[in-house]
Image: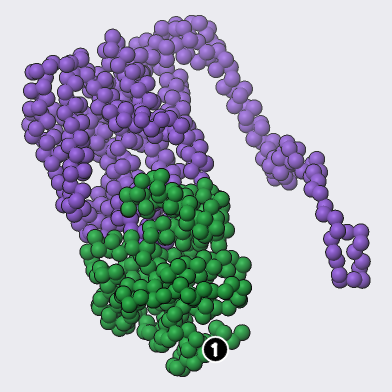
Amino acid sequence: MSDTHAHTVRFVRETMLPPQDPPSSQIGMVRWGRENLFDGPLNIILTVISLLVVLFLIMEMGPWFANSIWNANSLTECRQILDGASGACWGVIKDRWPQLMFGFYPPELYWRPVTALVLLFVAISPVLFPSVPKKVLYFTMVYPFLGVWLLWGGTIWGPVSVALGFVLGYVLVRATSQLSTLLSAAIVVILPILYWLFLAGPLVDALSAIAPLESQSVPSREFGGFLVSLVIGVSGIALSLPIGILLALGRQSNMPLIKYVSVIFIEFIRGVPLITLLFTASLLLNYFLPPGTNFDLILRVIIMVTLFASAYMAEVIRGGLAALPRGQYEAADALGLDYWKAQRLIIMPQALKISIPSIVSTFIGLFKDTTLVVFIGILDPIGLANATRASSDWQGIYWELFIFIGAVFFIFCFSMSRYSMSLERRLKTDHR
Amino acid sequence: MEATQDRSVNRAQMQVSDEVAIQITNMNKWYGSFHVLRDIDLTVNRGERIVIAGPSGSGKSTLIRCINRLEEHQAGQIIVDGTELSSDLKNIDKVRSEVGMVFQHFNLFPHLTILENLTLAPIWVRKTPKREAEETAMYFLEKVKIPEQANKYPGQLSGGQQQRVAIARSLCMKPRIMLFDEPTSALDPEMIKEVLDTMIQLAEEGMTMLCVTHEMGFAQAVANRVIFMDQGQIVEQNEPYEFFNNPQSERTKLFLSQILGH
């Protein structure tokens, strides 16, 4: 700089300037506070008001939490201990813990849902975390059948024979790969369905007669509490994503039949409240099903919740598909990839990545919506909370139960949300 | 023209055989009621390098996109390497795996690394073992002079590098014909040269090339035929020297004066 002269235009830099630290008022907490909390009179006022509100809340709720009573068998006992002071009676959670968790599941069999939950985490780990060896995916494929058997019990041949239908489907996919797509798709769909309808039942009977491998059967009406929320939520989440993907692709299909079936399905399901679908599941289906069929209530609810969520999922994924530049489809086509390979390798990985926030929102919504099953008589945590409040011991208790239930739901939903954010960061490769 | 000044182009290798690579007869295409391509007749022999020029909207991109059926033609016939393009999906996939295409906006797959971009089609379409596909990919990355970028993502590369990766991606499928759809139009002037160099190298190796471009220097140095299109028709075609120095139609003269005038 020193050698520049105002009267010459010519300038040649001889020494490059080294970078310097910014002034201390421009870094760290000082800068953050100035920019975010005390930036102008309006913000100063708002900051002060907010601090006062926080303080007020702490003063109000602090003692209530501080005086928590954990050991009490009824509200009366709890109030005696508190002796007029304000305080939370968490004793109700402790007293009703098994019920809130498992409903009326036989206590001597609690280990089964617990094992199922632990194995669930094992099963989803390779899907969630890339560091888990891919071989665990084989267990993930077995898990749905194992989980069902652990939870409901009965003969092991039931889940096995259902699983065989999927194996049959897989074998057919392999066997028909030379045929045209439409024909092979038809065979792959129809034959397993015929198998499930006509062969699976007798097969179970036959196998049970040969080797009666049974565990104690637990009927659906004994399920309750968070067990029921998790069973419905996890199945709904696991099933609605693939169905949603297919519906989204179906809606974009060139084939009118597939396109209109998808559109009508999506628009119909989205246009109807979930609660009506649940009532349909619990009441109306009985009229339509042949008399004598005992179609499991929880299974019916899972189907309805899944259909509901997959309609939303389809629209979310359609948004992701629409956001992809046309060039991606063209490049995949130009390289000779067929439709399904292009979808699987190029289009879906990107479309799903774009839609992660909305997909997870739909998952979270679905999980919270499972509490609606209380209206069709399934004792989920809300249903059990109501039952608890109606009991003579805990009549009149309110906050503690719902705070607890809310907290548990919050933990699940917040974990999903945090996971999705970390996933987005991990998949961020576009460096825009 | 500047782009090719500092490089002597070796035309000795660029031999055109008598074998027909692409045969287009009487081809017509409409977008709705708009007649984009009108009575296109074009025969391309193996080893030919054809540059297609013309004002925007003249149908030149649409023409080469019909050759690998990114666009569907409604009348006439297109035969690529002996396979006729019809609605038969098997034929379309066959042609597409034999014909490489380079796009104006590169269209690399942003969620895959450079190496994965290059090996994807060989592995999934050609069923090449992964190891072998990676070796081929590295060979072509060397060839386009960016082997050190193999494990980066497309978003980390400059435009010129991305376009060279796109060329390498097509080459990994060992195509017999390469289509270029304005490969340098989205690039900074500095990067145009590196892409053109790669294309010239390809031409020297005897690749059959159809290239929609505004790089007239490239056309003069490499092409053995220049096609001028306007309003969906082939207005004039000639070998480059004659095309540029002695254009016949008024429309061609006007076009050339516009793009070479300044």
Which quadrant does the N terminus of chain A fall into? bottom right
Q: Is residue A52 left or right of residue A354?
A: right
Q: Depth check: A280 or B243 in front?
A: B243
Q: Position of residue A108 (x, y in %)?
A: 28, 9
Q: Depth check: A228 or B28 in front?
A: B28
Query: Residue at the spot x=31%, y=25% of the render?
Result: A228
Q: Is residue B220 left or right of residue A396?
A: right
Query: Residue at the spot x=92%, y=59% of the render?
Result: A2
Its colouring scheme is by chain
Q: Depth check: B251 or A219 in front?
A: B251
Name the image quarter holding residue A356: top left
Name the image quarter holding residue B175: bottom left
Extreme residue toward the front, this view: B12
Q: Depth check: A303 or B251 in front?
A: B251
Task: Judge the density around disc 1: few (<14), some (14-19), many (≥20) Cα neighbours within 10 Å.
Answer: few
Q: Secondary structure at mark 1?
A: helix
* Colour seen for chain A: purple
Q: Position of residue A104 (x, y in %)?
A: 28, 16
The residue identified by callout 1 is B257
Decide: is B231 above or below A54: below
Query: Residue at the spot x=30%, y=16% of the render?
Result: A112
* Colour seen for chain B: green
Total numbered labels: 1
Q: Position of residue B41 (x, y in %)?
A: 31, 82
Is residue B207 something that shows in the picture?
A: yes
Q: Is residue B67 left or right of residue A194?
A: right
Q: Amino acid type of disc 1? A: Ser
